[in-house]
Image (cartoon, rainbow, N blue to C red):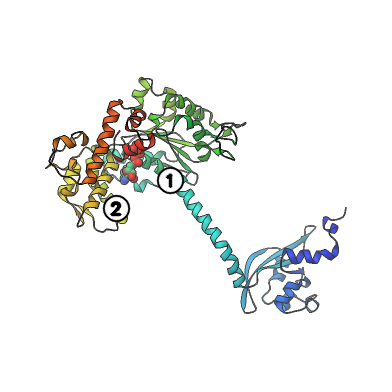
Amino acid sequence: MKGLIELIPSEWLEEVINLAAECTVVVDHNGIILYINNAYCEFLHVSAEESIGKPVQDIIENSRMQIVAKSGKAEVASIHPINGSEMVANRYPLFVGGELVGAVGTVMFRNPKEWLDYSRKLQPLMEELNYYKNRFEKELHSKYHFGDLIGESGKFREAKILAERVSDSHSAVLLLGESGTGKELFAHAIHHSSGRRYAPFMRLNCASIPEHLFESEIFGYEEGSFTGAKKGGKKGKFELANKGTIFLDEIGDLPLQMQSKLLRVLQEKEIERIGGRAPVRIDVRIIAATHRNLEEMVEKGLFRQDLYYRLNVIKIDIPSLRERREDIAPVSAVLLRKLEGKFHRQGLELSEEATRYLEQHSWPGNIRELENVLERAVNVLDGPIILPKHLPLYLRGEERPVSSSPPDSSFFPEQPFQIIPLRETVLQAEKLAIINAIKKTEGNKVEAAKLLEIGKTSLYDKCKQYSIK
Ligand SMILES: Nc1ncnc2c1ncn2[C@@H]1O[C@H](COP(=O)(O)OP(=O)(O)OP(=O)(O)O)[C@@H](O)[C@H]1O
């Protein structure tokens, strides 16, 4: 049978070569030029007649074609000094019937200017690529590692050591601790030091996800599977987390009906997109976290026992800040260093008296509350030292005895003539309204959000901000 190339009329061939690569040269096994096209001749200021049959190094300054024709090793994007400048050349060995018969050379860029023009075109594309790469890393990859977990007290160290030890295992981890103790930080750190660190880290907030979106969020869907489904469908969190880790935050807030759906995924290790035909196998490490007492919830029938067992393979208890008061000063010091960066300040420090107030407080919102208190202090600070007067009223002994209960319910009635900054008054009023609404609805945040006429997500955000459980 004829070679396919013979189907191309022979008079076309030269033009095909010219178009495929602007400058082309072909040499035999000894480096003798068999063919050189017009573009290359023009570039070298030679004619084809005087070049053909000559050793390539006599025609092309610094050529390495004769070497490639002998070594059989390609040289791609090689910098080639020529005509007092530098070109970028490709040299490929030519094998016919398995035998090395010569080499083909092409020129990618005849000089740095061509390369520069090309790279200018590439630049915006590279920037766009980097932008998405960074976003991908920010959104899907773990942000923290064990070095970011500050604390030297016994209980905290125990939790950290256990977390480090189990980070490389594939077993599920259950992180238990009050709000703001650093459960999410632990989850990031475990993923970061596991073998899955180059794969995605996905967070699913089980408390804020609306029931009707749960399935599409975790399983994803195929195009056209329901009205409003996006073109091309959508991957669910489990599929996105494949080979990596999924962090099921606030797992204790997941309604029972959704618990069964989640359990199925954990048992079968495969998911089926809504409207999909074939299940997709997934390999995801589970880290769940909650501030709730899951055992008690299981007893009351509020949390599925089988799901609890699936999640509770490695349990890590993260101590509250009041159980590790000795860590308050070192944690504050690290947080102040971070605030220095954020506020472009230097040398921020806590006075001894202010430290004592911090150490006496009960910290229901744990480190998140401490972060808020310090940030507020830095905002009202004149010099670099934080004094008791820079701390919120509820932390200050002179206005109100230090108590272990949250501040707000008594904030206004007890201090009728106290003048406090308007911003703080507004914040405290908001916090009080939220506490009252949650009390009225006996802890039902969805109902509380309705009473307050705000969205559920907004209520969860505010609860987090004010350390309300
Ligand atoms: N050990 C720690 N060292 C330094 N910063 C910490 C530590 N623990 C928590 N933080 C900081 O405290 C804040 C709250 O942490 P994180 O969100 O991990 O808590 P959480 O227990 O997941 O809270 P929630 O249950 O409310 O979601 C974060 O800004 C985090 O950076």
Residue 65, image x, y percentages? 71, 70
- Pointer 1 local density, CA inside 10 Å: few below 14, some 14–19, many at least 20: many
Tell me: is circle 2 under 8 Å from ligand 1. Answer: no
| Quadrant in the picture for the C terminus | top left
The quadrant holding residue 306 is top left
Q: Secondary structure at mark 2?
A: helix
Q: Amino acid at mark 1?
A: Ser
- Pointer 2 local density, CA inside 10 Å: few below 14, some 14–19, many at least 20: some
Marks 2/1: CA–CA distance? 22 Å
**Could you tell whether 163 is left or right of 104 in the image?**
left
Residue at x 36%, y 38% (from the top left corner) = 458
Residue 263, image x, y percentages? 48, 27
**Could you tell whether 285 is left or right of 359 in the image?**
right
Residue 10, image x, y percentages? 85, 63
Vertical position of residue 145 compared to residue 436: above or below: below
Residue at x 68%, y 73% (from the top left corner) = 63
Q: Amino acid at mark 2?
A: Leu
Vertical position of residue 148 compared to residue 10: above or below: above
Farthest residue to the right: give it.
1
- Specify the label residue 142 is tagged with: 1
Question: Which residue is label 2 attached to?
Answer: 339
Q: Earlier in the sequence, mark 2 or mark 1?
A: 1
- Specify the label residue 399 is tagged with: none
Task: State whether residue 81 appears in this view.
Answer: yes
Q: Nearer the viewer, mark 2 or mark 1?
A: 2
Task: State whether residue 149 appears in this view.
Answer: no
Tell me: is circle 1 under 8 Å from ligand 1. Answer: no
Q: How many marks?
A: 2
**Could you tell whether 80 is left or right of 381 in the image?**
right
Could you say which is closer to the camera, residue 369 or residue 151?
Answer: 369
